[in-house]
Image (cartoon, rainbow, N blue to C red):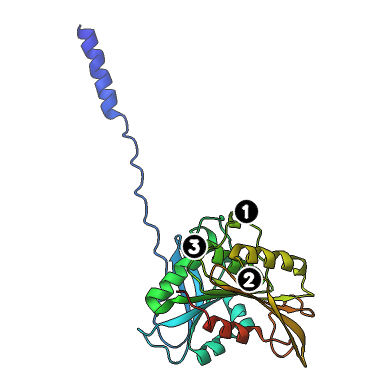
Amino acid sequence: MKRVLALLGIVTVLTACSPAAPTPPAASPSPALSLPPDQPGPGDHHLAIAHGGVKRDYALHAPPGYQRGRSLPLVLVLHGQPGNSAGAAGQSGMSPLADKAGFLVAYPQGEGGKWTPGTAGDPTSGDVGFVAALVDHLVSTWDADRKRVYVAGFSAGAAFSYRLARELPGRFAAIAPVSGRMDTVAAWTAPLGTGNPVSVLTFQGGQDMLSPAWSTTNASWREAAGCGAPTVTPIANARGQAERRVSRCANGGEHVVYALPLMAHEWPDAREHPVDASSVIVEYFARHSLP
């Protein structure tokens, strides 16, 4: 019995002397993202929002008459791939037009110069979620009018504008894809319906490398939106010829195509083409708003 007690005593001593299990280090908090402060006012602003734990940059231009508390339309301009906010601003020339017409214009920046489409049917995924968060931020912080939000885009930005219109129903009054095709996504086979009365204005060049996709893109959108046969109006001036094709749609919007047979992969302007895309876009957006 004494031997057993002695052995128990040795075990007790060894246990007491054995080193304790190391305490795991406390998790260090994630560093806060450094975001430039929003200071709403006229002029050019280089800003960012936090989305998905990541700093997402964008540029914003407010017209001279901008005042807090006064609701203004919002136009988003999406760059091509690769591209950036500055390139979108320069290519579209939208900021001077915003000064004349009185609207906010934002130039979001895709990470790595491209747009991440996310998962079809999931409006929170990829850059669809980023754009939705940006619009919400500009509505709450810059007084953008939620019923007058629009998207224009070039090339990959144009393709992404189609995606935004489908993935975020009831968020955009109109989109203007320039030299961009609509992706073929199985989740988009359902009709748009009156809950998504978005209108489309698009510019398509006959010499564009994407030109084989125009007929499919147009037919797919017209089918989804329930559009009727287009009314065709020829355009001719010293800078060439084009066609304007207008369809009225069951979703409550319209589908307008400017077909420029001699245009390549470009954003058409009045110096070289029979139509000036940016001016037409601004006029078109001004005629459309959500109910």
Inspect the image, locate mark 3, and give the three-letter code of the amino acid beneath it: Gly
Distance from Cα at disc 2 to Cα at disc 3: 17 Å
- Count of number-bearing discs: 3
Mark sitting on residue 186? 1
Measured Cα–Cα span from mark 3 to mark 1: 20 Å
Which residue is denoted by mark 2 in the rendering? 158
Q: Is residue 125 left or right of residue 210?
A: left
Which residue is label 3 attached to? 129
Residue 125 location in percent, x, y? 51, 57
Please state which of the two labelled residues, at mark 3 or mark 1, is closer to the viewer: 1
Q: Does the residue at mark 2 contact the one at mark 1 (Cβ under 8 Å)?
A: no
For label 2, count other residues whose C-alpha is less than 10 Å away and answer few (under 14), some (14-19) or many (20+): many
Residue found at x 77% / y 73%: 208
Percent x, y of residue 147: 44, 75
Q: Quadrant of the C terminus?
A: bottom left
- The amino acid type found where label 1 is placed reads Ala
* Residue 284: assigned label: none
Q: Mark 2 or mark 3: name the one nearer the start of the chain.
A: 3
